[in-house]
Image (tube, grey):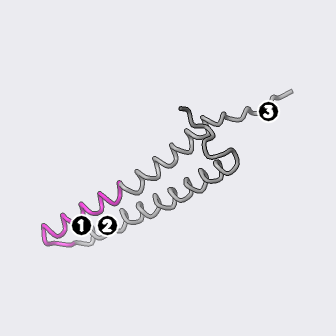
């Protein structure tokens, strides 16, 4: 007879939500910084090949993807807090 999967504690669930949020922040900020550095390089050098613009587009796409992940993480945190309370899973 198989045992049901144990559910993670509220602390573990809160840690997982924070991990997702932190990853989403880095996935948003990282491409924005890299893309802006690429744009600065383009303006300093004065040349703008298609490769530069492709890089900018890729970094903007990465930042948008990170922003979508950030919104999803915030939504999941809001649902968690609605279900268990605002201070659920927080240790003092």
Alpha-carbon neighbours of circle 3 within 10 Å: few (<14), some, or many (≥20)?
few
Q: Which residue is mark 1?
A: 39
The residue at the far left in this view is 45
Label the magenta part by its dominant secondary structure.
helix
Q: Which residue is mark 3?
A: 4
The residue positioned 20% from the left and 65% from the top of the image is 40
Numbered range of the magenta stretch: 30-48
Quarter the N terminus occupies: top right
The residue positioned 56% from the left and 32% from the top of the image is 91
Q: Which residue is mark 2?
A: 56
Q: Are marks 1 and 2 in contact (CB under 8 Å)?
A: yes
Quadrant hosting residue 8: top right
* Residue 18 rendering spot, x and y as whole percentages: 52, 44
35 magenta-colored: yes
| Secondary structure state at the residue bearing disc 1 | helix
User: Spatial distance from mark 1 to mark 3, Cα to Cα?
Assistant: 53 Å
């Amino acid at each position: 007879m198989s045992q049901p999967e144990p559910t993670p504690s509220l602390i573990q669930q809160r840690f997982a939500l924070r991990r997702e949020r932190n990853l989403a922040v880095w996935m948003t900020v990282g491409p924005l910084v890299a893309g802006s550095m690429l744009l600065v390089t383009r303006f300093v050098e004065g040349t703008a090949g298609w490769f530069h613009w492709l890089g900018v587009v890729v970094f903007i796409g990465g930042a948008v993807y990170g922003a979508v992940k950030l919104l999803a993480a915030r939504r999941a945190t809001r649902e968690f807090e609605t279900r268990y309370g605002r201070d659920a899973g927080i240790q003092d």
